[in-house]
Image: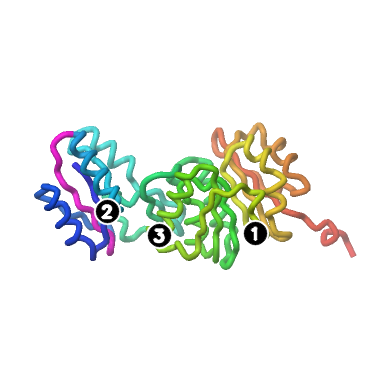
């Protein structure tokens, strides 16, 4: 079976295209007010993947899906939406679960890396929820699928620059920005951090200890005087080491979840702390 993602207005066009490709008995699922999923039976996994690839080449989001049994049960578990409190939720665009009442919904398409489910991503999303007030300029370093950039915009950031050194991550972020109607507020680029200009109210980097150490001078340079930097992707045992490489930024908060941790850092004005 294949699943083709469409809007309510695209259903007839997708149905017609599937008819042209010899697929019949399509079932339409309505997981939300505008999202429609066309489920089409295809005999054989290779035939299903070939058909899905044909539709993807035409610009559609199409994936293969198990028909039934334990594999389908696993698929349904894997595609469950992920919620973050009462303000954000993330799901794959082909998720069949009802999402009509999910708060701050973000849909992810194909490609890139990360769907919000990993602990390190969750730690940084929690910081975005706690700290974004609205109107911020945000830098997402190592954007993967763009989930952090998308979350920042959904929470009220005015503009996000998303950077990655993998072309597929940048392309996935661009596609996801379009999918969520955020392409006017998210710019994704493969440029090195040295090429990024200006400063940012918030910088998030879920890239691991080694990359943070390597990029530390640029992360510090790109942070505005009153901004905050949140980094993750390393174990709690190296938090202090990571913080040392980010001096003169000072550790504001440390968050640990199991084997993973995140640091929030910023510039502290010692003069403002001195008694008068």
Name the secondary structure under disc 3.
helix
Q: Nearer the viewer, residue 62 or 135?
A: 62
Name the secondary structure under disc 2.
strand
Q: Quadrant of residue 15?
A: bottom left
Name the N-terminal-most of marks 3 and 2.
2
Residue 259: x, y in percent?
Answer: 56, 33
Using the image, tell me which numbered label, if any, was put on residue 42: none
Label 2: few (<14), some (14–19) or many (≥20) C-alpha neighbours in 10 Å: many
Asked if the residue at tag 2 contacts the one at tag 3, i.e. Cβ–Cβ closer than 8 Å, the answer is no
Quarter that holds the N terminus: top left
Q: Mark 3 = which residue? A: 178
Residue 138: x, y in percent?
Answer: 59, 58
Using the image, tell me which numbered label, if any, was put on residue 200: 1
Q: Mark 2 = which residue? A: 5
Residue shown at the point (33%, 60%) measured from the top left? 101
Residue 227 painted magenta? no
Q: Nearer the viewer, residue 70 or 202?
A: 202
Q: Which residues are magenta?
A: 33-44
* Colouring scheme, one of rainbow, by chain, secondary structure, one colour: rainbow
Q: Is residue 202 left or right of residue 114?
A: right
Residue 198: x, y in percent?
Answer: 67, 60
Q: CA distance from mark 3 to mark 2?
A: 14 Å
Count of marks placed on residues: 3
Q: CA distance from mark 2 to mark 1?
A: 35 Å
Residue shown at the point (55%, 63%) measured from the top left? 159
Residue 43 painted magenta? yes
């Amino acid at each position: 079976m294949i699943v083709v993602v469409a809007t309510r207005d695209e259903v007839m066009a997708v149905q017609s295209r599937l008819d042209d490709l010899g697929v019949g008995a399509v079932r339409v699922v309505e997981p939300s007010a505008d999202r429609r999923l066309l489920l089409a039976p295809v005999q054989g996994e290779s035939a299903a993947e070939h058909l899905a690839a044909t539709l993807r080449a035409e610009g559609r989001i199409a994936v293969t899906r198990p028909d039934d049994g334990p594999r389908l049960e696993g698929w349904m578990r894997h595609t469950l939406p992920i919620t973050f409190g009462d303000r954000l939720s993330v799901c794959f665009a082909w998720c069949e679960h009802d999402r009509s009442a999910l708060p701050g919904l973000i849909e992810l398409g194909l490609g890139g890396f990360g769907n919000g489910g990993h602990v390190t991503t969750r730690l940084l999303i929690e910081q975005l929820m706690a700290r974004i007030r609205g109107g911020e300029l945000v830098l997402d370093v190592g954007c993967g699928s763009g989930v952090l950039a998308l979350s920042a915009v959904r929470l009220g950031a005015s503009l996000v620059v998303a950077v990655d050194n993998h072309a597929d991550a940048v392309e996935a972020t661009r596609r996801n920005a379009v999918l969520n109607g955020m392409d006017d507020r998210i710019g994704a680029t493969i440029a090195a951090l040295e090429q990024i200009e200006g400063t940012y109210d918030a910088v998030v980097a879920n890239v691991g200890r080694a990359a943070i150490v390597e990029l530390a001078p640029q992360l510090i340079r790109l942070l505005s005087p009153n901004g905050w930097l949140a980094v993750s992707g390393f174990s709690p045992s190296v938090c202090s080491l990571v913080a040392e490489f980010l001096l003169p930024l000072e550790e504001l908060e440390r968050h640990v979840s199991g084997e993973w941790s995140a640091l929030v850092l910023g510039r502290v004005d010692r003069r403002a702390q001195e008694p008068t």
